[in-house]
Image: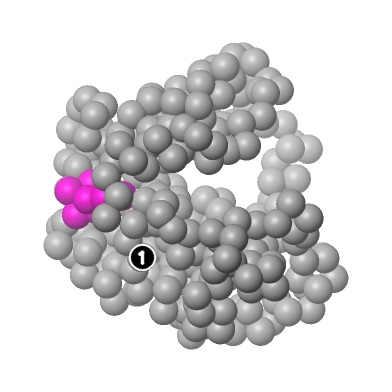
Amino acid sequence: MPSQEDLLAGYRRGYGPYPSPDCGHDAVRLPIGTKARFADTMRRYWHMVDGNATIDRVGLKGRVLDVGAGQGQNVEYLIRHGYETVGLEPNPLAARVCAEKGLPVLCGTLDSVSLEAETFDTVILSQVIEHLVDPRRSLDLVNRLLRPGGTVIIFTPNPKGAQAKLFGSNWAHWHVPYHVYLYGPIQLRRLLNRSRFVVHRLDTVSPAYWLSMSFQLWRHKSQQTGWALPASGRQLRYATRLAIAPLMRAIDLLKRGDCIVSIGIKA
């Protein structure tokens, strides 16, 4: 089991990329116009067709905390759409990018940063819970931060899904050592219940680019490369993604998709 210090050292060595910010402090706070709203609507429809695990697919409410904010993509999106949002990011390199963009992202973890209890309505853990060395304690802390009736939204890879079975040891989301724990739907429901959450929704989605990652790792023998994607790795073409979409969505309906989407309500 890696320690938290070991994991943070690995992130600091390069969990990026960390591009230079292309917008300033004021730009991220400008409300979106009609043209941008139309583009967002079209993007959301495409995410549904393509199976992408994105926050525009779930209902959000009130004040939002994005745990594991990365380089601030979700925080920026939420601010542009009028949500009062705070991000939390343990990787100082990624947190610095957020600061340079003028985003309200704190550098730290649920354990290390002091946040007032019952001050958030929604907490997002998108591709985060699998990285946590003590997920039960983290969800207990999330519960503390949420107001009564608040929701936690979790996106996490599904080791019980069809792609994990198909690709075996070459499945992209074993992602050793960064993915510490992985949960099937039953295990995730149990974990949420133990932290006093009632599971409101538990579905799966299968992003086409996740399938592309696993295929590339299988093709290039990931066991020998440490699950590193080759520099020449390419995503599936749009035509291919459209062609396989009906099959992928059918797998999702059977809850055998590559990514679990779960919403828990604070009991």
In the rendered image, the vertical position of residue 113 relative to residue 195, given as above or below: above
Residue 5 in the image: x percent, y percent?
A: 30, 37
Give the residue drawn at x 51%, y 21%.
96
Residue 179 in the image: x percent, y percent?
A: 40, 56
Q: Residues within 10 Å of mark 1 (few under 14, many from 20)?
A: some
Residue 211 in the image: x percent, y percent?
A: 64, 70
Q: In the displayed structure, does residue 235 sit left or right of residue 211?
A: right
Q: Which residues are magenta?
A: 132-138
Rendered image quadrant of residue 163: bottom right
- Secondary structure at numbered mark 1: loop
Q: Quadrant of the N terminus?
A: bottom left
Q: Quadrant of the C terminus?
A: bottom left
Give the residue drawn at x 38%, y 70%.
202
Give the residue drawn at x 49%, y 64%.
173
Look at the image and say whether residue 124 sits in the magenta stretch: no
In the rendered image, the vertical position of residue 69 relative to residue 60, given as above or below: above
In the rendered image, the vertical position of residue 213 relative to residue 5, given as above or below: below
Image mark count: 1
Residue 97 in the image: x percent, y percent?
A: 56, 24
Q: In the displayed structure, does residue 77 sit left or right of residue 193?
A: right
State how the image is colored: one colour
Relative to the observer, which residue lies in front, 257 or 20? Answer: 20
Which residue is under mark 1? 182
Relative to the observer, which residue lies in front, 81 or 46? Answer: 46
The answer to whether residue 243 is seen in the rendering is: yes
The answer to whether residue 120 is seen in the rendering is: no
Look at the image and say whether residue 135 sits in the magenta stretch: yes
Give the residue drawn at x 36%, y 65%.
182
Q: Residue flagged by tag 1: what amino acid is it? A: Leu
